[in-house]
């Protein structure tokens, strides 16, 4: 098979916001307890943070991490996770039916994020709570005056404000599973009033309103329009969430998952622009794809987990090669839509549908999806270029799916073009020809591939990892592979 990629420096999609490759840590399963925090672990620091986990997170250089939920946030009282740890309440956590000890809260998480060199993207509870508690949390985190909640933060040992810039107005409030789910209009009004008082508390913050919880939500479209009509002047971004999975064992169709993500982004963008026109507004609402990943392996097993335990092993999907390829195509789709998608969060970061896994008291290890995610973080820096991909396609799941999915990013500082490409073919390698309209030299070719689409990693063995391909005259993308090709501009 052959594929020709055409692009030209100057023919741009847009600048990539670093926050496009963010992640997410929720108080769910072993993400926090046993993940980033485990005071008895041999590598734990004085605050109880696992040093071995922090090291791997730092290797990724994750720009922004959403916290503390997720479904968890819709029943969360943020004050429970502040101040003297000995006095913090143990609570029934209804979203995931577990016990929350509150030994980690915003006091600790913002410190951990600082150690990880990441910004916090903070979600407020618009389920059981509302505007009042949301504005109090903004004051606690960012307040500079001599006022009650800013003083509460100071008494808890934090003189300097946390300076949290990015805030989510609740989580998936359209979903029936959400604690205190709402109709489009109920949420739109609540979010609008919360947004106003949060910005009046700190006018430097940016706000993300909830869009639909997935591309197939029954209220999709109506939800977005209603929220935008009510909140337009007070918000900066609208959220999208979606998870993918090979539920019916059809790999050919599963490998085409990114077509759905692309369509979802295009539709939400069109709705944002429709409301912009309707309001005769100059302001553009951008998108925050703040939950995306593969999530399906753990669904059945999770039903067996007993309720009301601390940090049960929930949502611990073990990923294989085909999941890494799908994650690769989803990253490519975010890059190709970076003119409107400014924020993205791979959900999640540690143990819960995550690239990084831990053993309680033991080792840390990297899942298959760690590699494409790490590559995007490292190499997708700069300006996304428009790309023309001439290649054949196949039909699966009623869709026409191109064999190659590709995106390119121009790094002006390094004078390099990085091409990201997934070969979806399970049979054939692909010879890649390029037409960049400029002199370039291929200086590096990284790939993630293998013969077995179902190959997984574990704490003991790393079957799926990155390999450096020897550069020869012909550039070959192996069958079923993720690739990063770096071209130096001469
Ligand atoms: O990331 C896991 C869960 O998926 C989140 O809590 C929720 O927002 C979504 O449904």
Image: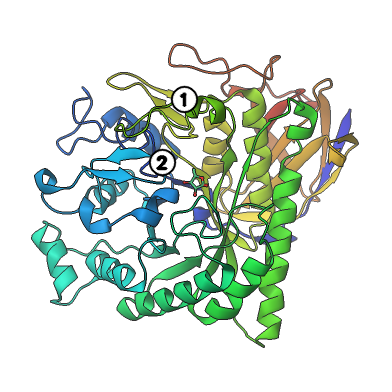
Residue furthest to the top in view is: 460
Percent position (x, y) of residue 273? 69, 74
Which residue is at a point 57% across and 26% down the rendered structure image?
319
Query: Dot 1 corresponds to which residue?
Result: 304
Left or right of residue 428, residue 281 in this image: left
Label 2 element class: loop
Residue 56, disc: none
- What's the distance in space between the residues labelled 2 and 1, CA to CA? 13 Å
Left or right of residue 420, residue 236 in this image: left
Percent position (x, y) of residue 307? 37, 32
**Of callouts 2 and 1, the N-terminal one:** 2
Residue furthest to the bottom in view is: 280
User: Dot 1, crowdedness within 10 Å: few (<14), some or many (≥20)?
Assistant: few
Which residue is at a point 29% across and 68% down the rendered structure image?
133
Which residue is at a point 39% across and 49% down the rendered structure image?
72
Above or below, 24 relative to 462 = below
Query: Dot 2 corresponds to which residue?
Result: 96
Which residue is at a point 38% across and 34% down the rendered structure image?
29
Does residue 418 appear anywhere in the picture?
no
Contact between marks 2 and 1 (CB within 8 A): the answer is no
* Of the pair 104 and 370, the residue shown nearer to us: 104
What is the tally of numbered marks visible in this picture? 2
Of the 4 image quadrants, the one containing the N terminus is: top right
Left or right of residue 409, residue 204 in this image: left
* Of the pair 246 and 115, the residue shown nearer to us: 246
Above or below, 242 relative to 230 = above
Q: Is mark 2 within 8 Å of ligand 1?
A: yes
């Amino acid at each position: 098979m052959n594929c020709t990629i055409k692009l030209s420096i100057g023919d741009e999609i847009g600048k990539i916001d670093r926050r496009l490759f963010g992640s997410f840590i929720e108080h769910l399963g072993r993400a926090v307890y046993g993940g980033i925090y485990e005071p008895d672990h041999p590598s734990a620091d004085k605050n109880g943070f696992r040093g071995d986990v922090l090291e791997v997170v730092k290797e990724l250089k994750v720009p922004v991490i959403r916290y503390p939920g997720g479904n968890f946030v819709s029943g969360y009282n943020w004050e429970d996770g502040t101040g003297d740890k000995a006095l913090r309440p143990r609570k029934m956590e209804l979203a995931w039916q577990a016990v929350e000890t509150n030994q980690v809260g915003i006091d600790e998480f913002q410190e951990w994020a600082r150690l990880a060199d990441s910004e916090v993207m903070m979600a407020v509870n618009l389920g059981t709570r509302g505007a009042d508690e949301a504005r109090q949390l903004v004051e606690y985190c960012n307040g500079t005056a001599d006022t009650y909640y800013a003083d509460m933060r100071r008494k808890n040992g934090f003189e300097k404000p946390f300076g949290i810039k990015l805030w989510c107005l609740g989580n998936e409030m359209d979903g029936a599973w959400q604690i205190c789910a709402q109709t489009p209009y109920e949420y739109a009004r609540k979010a609008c009033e919360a947004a106003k008082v949060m910005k009046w508390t700190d006018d430097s913050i940016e706000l993300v309103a909830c869009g639909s919880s997935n591309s197939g939500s029954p209220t999709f479209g109506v939800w977005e329009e209603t929220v935008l009509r009510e909140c337009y002047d007070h918000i900066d971004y609208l959220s999208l969430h979606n998870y993918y999975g090979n539920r019916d064992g059809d790999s050919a169709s599963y490998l085409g998952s990114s077509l759905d993500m692309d369509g979802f982004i295009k539709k939400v963008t069109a709705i944002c622009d429709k409301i912009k026109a309707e309001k005769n507004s100059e302001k553009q609402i951008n998108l925050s794809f703040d939950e995306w990943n593969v999530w399906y392996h753990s669904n059945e097993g999770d039903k067996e987990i007993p309720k009301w335990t601390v940090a049960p092993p929930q949502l611990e999907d073990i990923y294989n090669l085909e999941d890494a390829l799908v994650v690769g195509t989803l990253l490519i789709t975010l890059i190709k839509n970076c003119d409107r998608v400014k924020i993205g969060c791979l959900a999640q970061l540690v143990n819960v549908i995550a690239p990084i896994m831990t053993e309680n008291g033991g080792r840390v290890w990297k899942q298959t999806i760690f590699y494409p995610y790490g590559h995007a973080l490292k190499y997708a820096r700069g300006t996304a270029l428009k790309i023309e991909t001439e290649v054949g396609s196949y039909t699966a799941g009623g869709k026409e799916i191109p064999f190659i999915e590709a995106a390119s990013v121009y790094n002006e500082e390094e004078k390099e073009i990085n091409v990201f490409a997934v070969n979806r073919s399970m049979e054939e390698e692909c010879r890649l020809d390029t037409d960049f309209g400029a002199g370039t030299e291929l200086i590096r070719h990284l790939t993630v591939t293998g013969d077995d689409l179902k190959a997984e990693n574990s704490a003991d063995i790393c079957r799926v990892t990155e390999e450096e391909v020897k550069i020869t005259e012909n550039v070959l993308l192996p069958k079923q592979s993720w690739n990063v090709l770096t071209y130096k501009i001469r």
